[in-house]
Image (cartoon, coloured by chain):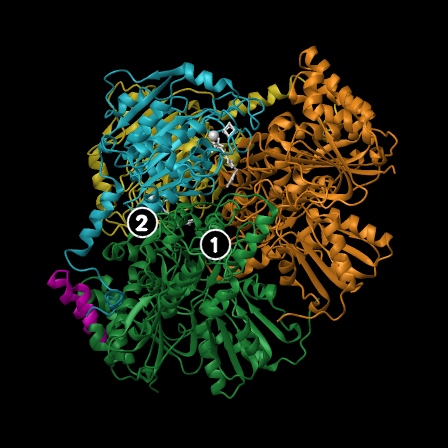
Chain colours: A green, B orange, C cyan, D yellow
Amino acid sequence: MPTKDLTIAMIGSGGDGVVTMGEMLAQAAARDGLNVIKTEAYGPQIRGGETSCVVRISSEKIYAQGDAVDILAVFNWADFGRFKGEVVLHPNAAVLFEEADAAAPTPADLGLGEGHSWVPVPFLKLATESTGTKAAKNIVSLGLFAELFGLPNESIRAAVEKKFTKKKAAVLEANLKGFDAGVAFAKALPGDLGARRLLYTKGSPKLLMSGNEASAVAAIHAGCRFFGGYPITPSSEVLHFLSEWMPKVGGSVIQTEDELSALGSCVGASFAGVKSMTSTSGPGLSLMTEMLGLASMAEIPTVVLDVQRGGPSTGLPTKSEQSDIWQAVFGGHGDQLRAVVAPTDVADCFHATVDAFNIAEEYQLPVIILSDQGIGQSRSTVDEEGLVHKVVDRAIPDPALGDKYLRYQDTESGVAPMSSPGMKGLMYQTNGLEHSESGSPSAMYLTHEKMNHKRYRKLRPIRDKYERFLQFGPEKANVGILCWGSSAGPVREAVAAANARGESVSAFVPQLIYPFPKHPFLKFLAGCDKLLVLEISFAAQFYKYIRTFMTLPDDRTILFKRSGGKNLTVGEVNDEIRKALAAKLPLEVKK
Amino acid sequence: MPTKDLTIAMIGSGGDGVVTMGEMLAQAAARDGLNVIKTEAYGPQIRGGETSCVVRISSEKIYAQGDAVDILAVFNWADFGRFKGEVVLHPNAAVLFEEADAAAPTPADLGLGEGHSWVPVPFLKLATESTGTKAAKNIVSLGLFAELFGLPNESIRAAVEKKFTKKKAAVLEANLKGFDAGVAFAKALPGDLGARRLLYTKGSPKLLMSGNEASAVAAIHAGCRFFGGYPITPSSEVLHFLSEWMPKVGGSVIQTEDELSALGSCVGASFAGVKSMTSTSGPGLSLMTEMLGLASMAEIPTVVLDVQRGGPSTGLPTKSEQSDIWQAVFGGHGDQLRAVVAPTDVADCFHATVDAFNIAEEYQLPVIILSDQGIGQSRSTVDEEGLVHKVVDRAIPDPALGDKYLRYQDTESGVAPMSSPGMKGLMYQTNGLEHSESGSPSAMYLTHEKMNHKRYRKLRPIRDKYERFLQFGPEKANVGILCWGSSAGPVREAVAAANARGESVSAFVPQLIYPFPKHPFLKFLAGCDKLLVLEISFAAQFYKYIRTFMTLPDDRTILFKRSGGKNLTVGEVNDEIRKALAAKLPLEVKK
Amino acid sequence: MSATLEMPTFQPADYKTDLKPVWCAGCGDFGVLTGVYRAMAELQFKPWETVVISGIGCSSRLPGYVATYGFNSVHGRALPIATGVKVARPELNVVAVGGDGDGLAIGGNHFMHACRRNLDLCYILMDNEIYGLTKGQAAPTTPSGDKTKSTYYGNPEPSVDPCELAISMGATWVARGFSGDLKGTVDLLVKGMSHKGFAFLNIMSPCVTWRGDDQFKTLKAKLRNLPEGHDPTSRSEALKFTRETDIMTVGLLYEVKQPSLVERLSAQKVTSLRGGAPPTTQDVIKSFYPAF
Amino acid sequence: MSATLEMPTFQPADYKTDLKPVWCAGCGDFGVLTGVYRAMAELQFKPWETVVISGIGCSSRLPGYVATYGFNSVHGRALPIATGVKVARPELNVVAVGGDGDGLAIGGNHFMHACRRNLDLCYILMDNEIYGLTKGQAAPTTPSGDKTKSTYYGNPEPSVDPCELAISMGATWVARGFSGDLKGTVDLLVKGMSHKGFAFLNIMSPCVTWRGDDQFKTLKAKLRNLPEGHDPTSRSEALKFTRETDIMTVGLLYEVKQPSLVERLSAQKVTSLRGGAPPTTQDVIKSFYPAF
Ligand SMILES: Cc1ncc(C[n+]2csc(CCOP(=O)(O)OP(=O)(O)O)c2C)c(N)n1
Ligand SMILES: Cc1ncc(C[n+]2csc(CCOP(=O)(O)OP(=O)(O)O)c2C)c(N)n1
Ligand code: SF4
Ligand code: SF4
Ligand SMILES: [Mg+2]
Ligand SMILES: [Mg+2]
């Protein structure tokens, strides 16, 4: 039965070309106007280690990586074993695997059902015979898949051409031969494999980008002209991208000696009047703790993009988790103010990043963007028209003020205009000590209390002005889901499916995390019988954070939380929805 | 009317010898078996800046610095102005001030009442005439005070002798003359000044120490033999003290290049089997964020003493605040486990520190001690008998295990015995990556979930075994106060006073902060009509932290919070008790 | 320096703020501050185009006393912040200042890399061989064996020569001065502040409170000027005047010409456009369409 | 080294764990690992009295492959942890290892101060002139002008010579090696691991993945041995073989005798007692009674 939505997983060792294969598939689909979400996962090796690449292709809007794999290509079963619990098959999946690999499990081992297909393929043999090198296994598979599953054959072929166009003609030719060998092999296959064919009509090309790239583009759009960073997985793509593009727009990128210096340089650049950003992941964010406090105290706008990975410590550097929220909101000594935003998908990385700059510049504080590996490094199709977002700049003092200029004037909004070097007559000397309105250091209790008030006064206007959230499903529901960040995608799909089944489920996803869009959430909550909180943090950081400022109804609140290391799946959300629907009120409350 | 309890404040510039004066007074009182609490406050100058020293002396047990000053000595009114809002006078205070200072305010300016005394004193003249140097002003005052207010005259004289015993005989003689001149001046004074005389009988000497010193002594007692630190106000005394004493007990102290290295060296020493500690304040704690995560992930016991000061950033380096609790509990990326304890006074610094070591060693995690400037740098009398505390050591694996030894075995308690270098056959390789039971790196979701479970399983036994808290007042009360750390002292005194007035007030003070002694608190809460939460953090960090794991009854909970910069006073607590008693139930709940 | 020949517009006093220094009477940092006022006046730095940045320490209080844009930041991080300011706004005069603890202990890494990057900053390290603000602990420049608050039995660690470190890390202008010598200080500051590339001035600035009144005299007694004919372009010649024990040579030890980071980054901006116009956001976005 | 004359108890293979290295085929770090096995065997280090500590990076994975006590810590912090281990337990053999990014970028400050402290550690820096683990960004040793993932228009920063830095900061044993030369590597490792004081070995260890297969050949072609008669006790002689461009001199550049930190701290422990017995907790407590 043809489908509008296919999830294809490829697993092998580095040398198997799984990553290239996935990328070409994704590009080809994007070129044909299909919707694509592509994710990758690796073992600890830099090269040659186990790799899995999952590409979901659909002719309809999609919001989550595919979690039930329809088509699985395995070049090496040992590698497959290393993704245990992470790659989950649809009961009816088609499994194509290297026939020369003796270590094959049985379909039952993989939990396959009645409708599955089990297809040994001589990938290796086909590749060597058709191209002379086993390196072309992935190209052979591309041909095979294109033919068998109705994938954009012509475009994939174009992708192959593009890839090898700079190589010798013979190389290109050989690879095209490999592609054709795959096609031929597919044609010769018996049975109902073709039942999983993708149904679509070709549309106009779509952008294909990762969340990290979307953030980088957004920074340029927001007027950021200084980036100071230190490499770290899974955020380095921002540094890479900006090292190419920032100079073109007249900005600067420096790779600093460490993260303390990275954020320090951003604070300096912003003090000097230039919008600035750094990007990092958990370990780097931890190292920035003290400098964040300085930006907070000296009220210097700057943006920190944290692409979360599994923690604590070095943790799981290549895997996703939602466990930096405490560090983002609460990290740092003293009462230090910052704002936190969180994108929900690749395109939203663009919006969250521009918002982060807008909040930072308008309210003069550091803003943290909490992305995660699942969004930051997955590549997804994006509509160009959606990438539009208004840019706000910081307020500049009236030069006529002269000596009367008070950098930290205790205004009603908590914000005083900010001068920068070059502005005559508006000089000031600032510091991380508590200080008076003019900026002079003061250790007096009365000054401290007054200036704390001034700084914290910004919270409410930020909340009201930048109140961003998503809401899915009906206004009144039996189960209302609260989640954040990359969980939004699977939740959105699960809610849609549940609603389609006639189940009464809705969801609320804040994109402004701190301050929190409390009022819309309270309204949402009022419409739900039960609240289901979902997150990927063993310590339930989001749930507990919410509790700090809001009394949740314990006897109708359900928490689902688990460790990271694999992204939230639609299937998991489905399961939790089912359980929540079945739960009887009032729920039992643990003391 | 004679009293059992006197609070004396001295204010001047560095050169006025205010600090020496306070110290001699405190030592003399301790020698006579009186109870003493002494605090100091400074302006930003290193030398010569404004200084205030407040000494409370009592023949009965005291728990807080004196907040309503009975006797005030002002050498310089300009300096007095710099402690506005911080030094509060009793309406009946006796104010003795330099008569040569033309800038004197009126008694009304200081809010003095009917019973006050207003005494210009020619400190300068007396000093130069009797000793030949104006530097002896403080010694003159000591004589004056001793005579006038019944302070331990003989012991103060002994303190003067001790102080100048190493100087030339002429210097000692001159100072004793100065002392006598003060005594003589006092005798000649008319009026009812003597009504504020201290009533006491001499007892056996008491120890006089600061909280920082008590922590340092406790570290030695707990078996700590490695200290790696970086200086920072208000915690450096720990480094100073241990640099003298640690080598004597065979241990080592190193001053590292920064705080990252300080905690790093502690992690190394502990990995090597030697109990270790560092001490710091907010900025340093922030810099230790990442290393704390490593200790958490690699399950390495170590102790971090954080002597809190006003924040954020450099903040108010010499003033107290209770605003590092979020950083202590929540700071750091990923789900990272640690424990947090908090001493309530100087003597309790000893117990909290030994407990911190015991928890760290028994449960193999980093433990943070949240002290504050108010406890850490105030000096107070302590009973020697109280300084006893059982010491726990880490569990060592059975050498017979050999190859079967699993460093991170997933035991029921979450704790597996820990070998250290030198132990044959029990070698292991550890890391900050997620890892299996043997310690091998693993990025697998299943391993991560299992090991998170293992680590977090420690929380409950810590809570149950190290359940430490204080409770004052009746079991059932109209108002139950919840506070922590240095707030315990003023709360204890205010509760006692309220109870004496027949008011129904009690208090609960956890000394184990994370995990929290939830069950005793719930029991306490059940006995209270209203809950009054008190803390010195503008952002209400303690209150919000409590909310993360416990649903407080909003319609009967009152929060009092303010910025640091001055310690909590008994007077403030009194005011809040009064308001809370008057509040009608149910309280209005803000949405 | 040709400006000195014209009628100067800015006087040293114009660089003074109203804030009274918190330093102890007799502190060496007063001399450095006066030197900074004079050097800025001599260079006719426009106050509003000048930024002075420090970390934390007694010495790091200096920016509060200079009527330019100023930033007394956090301990050890003067140079990262200064780096951000200068890279973002290369046209500004950027001066970083701080103490030996600030710059060599907690801030050591930034110092190393600032030397290496050769960004056009003048970094003034006020070396009192002690932690002043925190009341007297050992610094990386505290002589080995000295008793301090943190080294009860004498400092067990050898001390470092900041000038040697700077030279080895690639700083292109390295000098040593003494805050007690105002003329020499001003001279070095003027040169350092006009150097293209990273200029490092290690200025001995006594702490009367924690190193005693003697430090002034001891330092003064050790003072020597560089010998006539010293070749500042030679690394090996310069290193002859580092790690001295009984004497202390002051003057411009080392000076070479190397492209500064500002020059290199500016060149890259030009290269990046390959003669074309700067891209708009839309151009950047369009680069994400599949390229076939 | 006299142990080599006796019947050795530990063979190189005894230092091998079951963990398979995650390194790319052809990575230079394999050579260093083999060298470590052999050197430890030659020195007959008891595995359980030996600790290998690293930060984060490809090279920092090494401790997982050595069957002693081992610690693959966090990025840049190998030396602080190693310092804690060695100061707390001076009798252990402590070896710190890591990459150029780990040791010179984020960990630069600890490196500086470890050199200065002269603690008896052997620190092996596996220099591939790149960030390997994070997939190819510029390191402090990446040659100026090189294109990397983070320097699209070429590295704008000059590179640093780690050996020069170590010498200037007071390290007492400084050598350069090449992981492709196993014999030389073992020789230097044996010497470094037996040095009393801080021993620094900068070992060129190619990254075939991000610097290309050429790096091996390029490095090999630049290799020179130290000239006969080189005087390793002379700082200025040693510095002649630093910051080289077209050649790369390997061997023991610098070696001097200085009291190590372990020696100094041990001496202080003795002094502190003034011949008396160590105090008990009670003795410490009693010191707080007023002393008059
Ligand atoms: C992160 C952090 N650690 C420690 C401190 C405490 N601290 C303030 S200044 C200082 C050292 C001062 O010495 P130096 O830099 O030499 O300056 P000086 O006072 O001697 O001029 C220290 C350790 C701090 N403010 N922040
Ligand atoms: C605090 C922190 N910042 C950044 C990283 C990311 N990171 C891991 S290894 C590495 C650099 C690796 O380079 P190098 O130390 O030279 O080792 P190599 O892989 O080349 O052997 C970086 C930046 C991290 N793990 N932690
Ligand atoms: S303590 Fe020393 S460095 Fe600080 S102001 Fe006083 S004299 Fe200067
Ligand atoms: S990436 Fe480079 S350094 Fe890392 S393992 Fe591969 S070859 Fe070695
Ligand atoms: Mg100093
Ligand atoms: Mg490297």
Please name whichever residue, A323 or C119, is drawn nearer the observer in this view of the structure: C119
Element at badge 1?
A: loop
Which region of the structure is painted magenta? A158-184
Q: Position of residue A152 (x, y in %)?
A: 25, 77
Quadrant, the C terminus of chain A: bottom right
Q: Mark 1, residues whose alpha carbon is within 10 Å: few (<14), some, or many (≥20)?
A: many
The amino acid sitting under disc 1 is: Gly
Q: Position of residue B443 (x, y in %)?
A: 45, 57
- Residue that label 1 marks: A315
Q: Is mark 2 within 8 Å of ligand 2?
A: no
Asked if A572 appears above or below B42 in the picture, the reply is below
The image's mark for residue C88 is: 2
Find residue A278 and report its image quarter: bottom left
Horizontal relation, residue A334 to residue C9: left or right: right
Camera-near label (1 vs 2) is 2
Q: Position of residue D203 (x, y in %)?
A: 33, 36
Asked if D21 appears above or below A454 in the picture, the reply is above
Please name whichever residue, B90 or B110, is drawn nearer the observer in this view of the structure: B110
Can residue A103 be seen here? no
Secondary structure mainly formed by the magenta segment: helix
Element at badge 2?
A: helix
Which residue is at 32% across, 48% downward? Answer: A422
Chain letter of the residue beneath label 2 in the structure image? C
Q: Mark 2, residues whose alpha carbon is within 10 Å: few (<14), some, or many (≥20)?
A: many
Can residue B500 be seen here? yes
